[in-house]
Every structure is written in C-alpha cells, then in structure tokens.
Image (cartoon, rainbow, N blue to C red):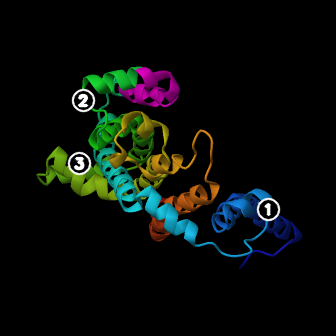
Amino acid sequence: MGHKYTGRTFIVEILAIALGLVFLVPFYYVISNSLKPFAEILTNTSALPKVFQFENYVQAFEKLDYLNVFTNSLIITVTSNIVLVIFCSMAAYMLVRTKKKISHVIFMTFVAAMIIPFQSIMIPLVKTAGNFGLLNSIWGLVIMYLGFGSGMTIFLYHGFIKGIPVELEEAAIIDGCTRFGVFWRIVFPLLKPITVTIVILNSLWIWNDFLLPSLVLQDPELRTIPLATFFFFGQYTKQWDLALAALVLGIIPLLIFFFSMQKHIIKGITSGSIK
C-alpha cells in the first residue's frame, strides 16, 4: 500500500522546493549577469539581460586560454583522483585487516590530520616543496593533493571496508589467491559505491581549489581554471562581465561530470543498502 498524501507532506514539499530555489539564486545571478554588458551589470544586477551578450563567452574563452587551462585542470583532477583511490583504498584495507595497535594509531593520525587548518602549514609546505623540486609542477601538485586528501579518503574507505565480510577473503586465499590479488579481485570491486562518492567529493574540491595551485603553479602555462579566472580581477579594475562568463565555463565541466555520474550514485546507494 502507498503512503497517504497528507497536509504535512505537502508542507514539507513546499519547504523543500523553496529551499531548492534559494540554492539556485546564486546560479541565476552568475548566469544572467554573464550574458550582460559590463554597464548593465553595474546598473541592474538582478534583472534578466535586455540583450543576450554571448560575446562575453567568446572573449572569456580567448583570454582564459580555455583549452589550455581546462586541460591542466582535467589532468590534475583525474590524476589526483586515480592516485588517491589506489593508495588510500589499499592503505584503508590494510589498516582494517591488520589487527594491531599500530594500525589504530596510524588511522587516528590520518583522521587527526583532517582538522589541521591549511593556512597554518602554507609556509612550511612551500619551503619543503621547493627543497624537493615540487614547485611549478603539475605532478608536484598531485603529490600534495595525495597528502591533503588522504585523511578523508582513508576515513571513508575504512568505514566501508569494515562492512565487507572477511570470509570472502579467506575463501579466496584458500583457493590460492595472494593478499594483493584478494584486494584487487574481491575487495576493490565491492568498494564501487564508496569509490564513486570519494571521486565526486575529491573532484569538487580539486577542480575548484584556488589556494594550493596559486602557491605551487607560477608558470602561466600551468594555470588551472580558477587561477586563470582570478586574473579578471585586477588591482584597479574588475571585469565582471568576462569573469562571470569564465565562472560559467569553469562550472560546465563539473555539471556534465556530475550528471554523467548520477546513475552510478543511485546504483551505489541501492547496492550499498542491499549489501
């Protein structure tokens, strides 16, 4: 039998719709103003454009050197995700299955590292990165994302792996599978729901990150989309028309990624609940 539609359900739906509209307001301002001339943005921010100025996007595309900065952002985000998933899933697996006090200490150290403010370690980070030749390098930035993202990623994997029956692994070992083979053939495929979640969370963080790339990447050819967008804001002038168009160009790839992953998110939730 279906649930009865009540007045309370109606009120909850109205509140949910209202809350959704509140969250969409910033998107409205960004998109509508990205299609206006600069003067119109200053005089009437909240109105719809009188004339749709698509030239903003053409100019922003050219001034951003969009294909280059998009490629840089894509390489950094994809590579960082791959490295984080491989290393952190293996680390979490060993921390869960190794029943020793040191495993608990290491896990708690990773969790504790999550609460350290990034601003407090910026200067030591830059100095250390310079000593190891990691500055002005995309691969150096990926290594740093591995360090900063490990805490949360291991924490999420750790909790999920604890729910996987150890009997599956024992049966595989009896059949002659190595510990390495057990992880990649038995355990890792079962981690798909949490892996999808981790990839989405880390992608949102890495793609939109400004502070760490601004410290590491000084070469204009290595700029990411957020770094390139920042240069529309000068000391004396702010090119809001081009900057807002650039922001939309930066958001579009993330939206495409999120909607393409949507069915995997739903599958992950359902398979996780069945498990």
Q: Is any part of residue 105 visible from this angle? A: no
Judging by the rendered image, the residue that carries numbered circle 2 is 133
Work out whether mark 3 precedes mark 2 in sequence or the reverse, and give the earlier one: 2
The image shows residue 18, relative to residue 194, as above or below, that is below
The image shows residue 73, relative to residue 18, as above or below, that is above
The residue positioned 26% from the left and 56% from the top of the image is 186
Q: Is any part of residue 38 visible from this angle? A: yes
- Mark 1, Cα crowd under 10 Å, few <14 / some 14-19 / many 20+, is few
Amino acid type of disc 2? Gly
Judging by the rendered image, the residue that carries numbered circle 3 is 170
Mark 1 vs 3: CB contact within 8 A: no
Q: Name the residue furthest bottom.
A: 1
Q: Residue 163: x, y in percent?
A: 42, 48
Q: Residue 4: x, y in percent?
A: 80, 75
Secondary structure at numbered mark 2: loop
Judging by the rendered image, the residue that carries numbered circle 1 is 44
Q: Residue 12: x, y in percent?
A: 81, 64
Q: Residue 246: x, y in percent?
A: 53, 59
The residue positioned 41% from the left and 53% from the top of the image is 199
Q: Name the residue furthest right.
A: 7
Report, in whole angstroms, how far the alpha carbon at label 1 lies from the one at label 3: 67 Å
